Image (tube, grey):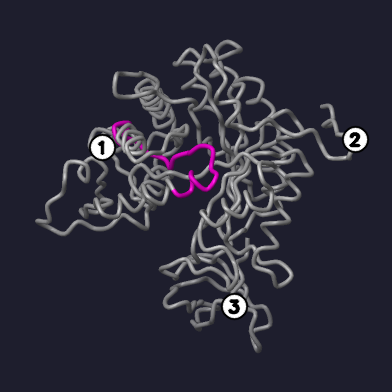
Amino acid sequence: MCPAETTPTGTRNPDPKIIDILKEEREEQAVSLEYFPPRTDAGLKNLYARMERMLSTTKPLFTDMTWGAGGSTAELSLAIAQHAHDTGHVANMHLTCTNMEKDGDPIKGVHDALVACQEGGIRNIVALRGDPPEGQEEWIADKGGFTCALDLVKYIRKEFGDTFGISVAGYPEGHPNAISEVKEGEPMTEAEQGRSSNFDGVTYTCKEADYQKEMDYLKQKVDAGADFIITQMFFDTQVFKAFVKDCRECGITCPIVPGLMCINAYAGFRKMSKFCKTRVTPALDEALEAIKDDAEAVKKFGVDFGTQMCQELMTTSDNYEGVPVLHFYTLNLEKVVYGIMDQLGLSTNGNLSEKTDESDAKDMVAVGSAWARVGDTVKINAEDYGSKQGIVKEIKDGLYTVEMDGVEATFAKDAVTKVF
């Protein structure tokens, strides 16, 4: 593998901006891929091998690398994004505002990451806010720090000008924080019904007033300098099409890229859809319930269902423009992506499904959030505890109840460190 070339100043040759690539005409439907930083060294080694294989077999337009919640993977995300750039990918690195304090400065961690990208030839950033700590209902910025993704977009444009291409997140069903419970007997508009979800017998939706706030905020991010939008996952293509229509009607004209979560496993699908309150149609729900105990059948269904979604997204009409690229959340795996590409006729090197190697699937576990959650193992940084470890049993009002040797004790957030 050849090392990346450098410019006379010593910095690596820069990637093209994704927005410029999206504007190019192409005969075939383009795809892009997203990976996350794995937890172990073995996982990282295998991820690099998979990224190299999938670069050759799928020819992705660009490659995303996620940034762990709470900044848990800051250095690793940057290292993997740099590796992607150096090995021929157009790297699109996620960057959040959360937990990026450095040397007492709430912004320095973000600034240093952007400088490293600039020097390393990375020219594309996904500007995100990040998640709040577990047990905290609202995301609270550090004093003097960023308060939202909009602040990050503005900062990048102010401090780095046109150096970076910037993408931002869009939420076809509304941000999870903007989705609320629908009380029994409470009426819903047709649009609210179309983006509604149901979990454990409770119906949720992003209500019209909140959805309009979402649209207004998204437009602010684009107006501040974002080049294009990548959406949160969805499993109902009609929701995405309605979202695109709503964006256009409120003056958002940039490209909108659909984020496609590959269904690889029943448990993962259920966990993620419930966490994000993502709409699951009755037909999808019933189909997965029928095969939930057959792992291979779930993957095969993931291929068939993903193919159907992509075909619907690719088919244009008088009131629907199609999509510039199909963006796959790979979950660091390849079988479902390869199967979808085969069925869509997008495979460049024959039958990709026959080239699948997921023998390393057990190593593809994410680092996870920097914030300790219920069930996590933590180390206690408090006098008289000597770095003792325990299990988080409850988080309430910013206090952590931890069980150690059968005894529970409560600690402030600063006294608890998650053990990975």
Query: Counting residues from the N terminus, which is met first, the one under dot 1 or under dot 2?
Result: 2
State whether residue 52 is above or below residue 29: below
Q: Which residue is mark 3?
A: 414
In the visual, does 44 lie left or right of 207? right
State whether residue 310 is above or below residue 174: above
Q: Point out residue 242 in the picture as x, y percentages from the top left corner.
A: 30, 35
In front of the other: 71 or 274: 71
Mark 1 lies on a secondary structure that is loop
Q: Which residue is mark 1?
A: 281
- Residue type for callout 3: Asp
In front of the other: 352 or 344: 344
Q: Point out residue 12 in the picture as x, y percentages from the top left corner.
A: 81, 36
Q: Which residue is mark 2?
A: 8
- Please identify the quadrant where the C terminus is shown: bottom right
Q: Point out residue 197 in the picture as x, y percentages from the top left corner.
A: 26, 47
Q: Residue furthest left?
A: 185
- Residue type for callout 1: Thr
The magenta segment: 220-239
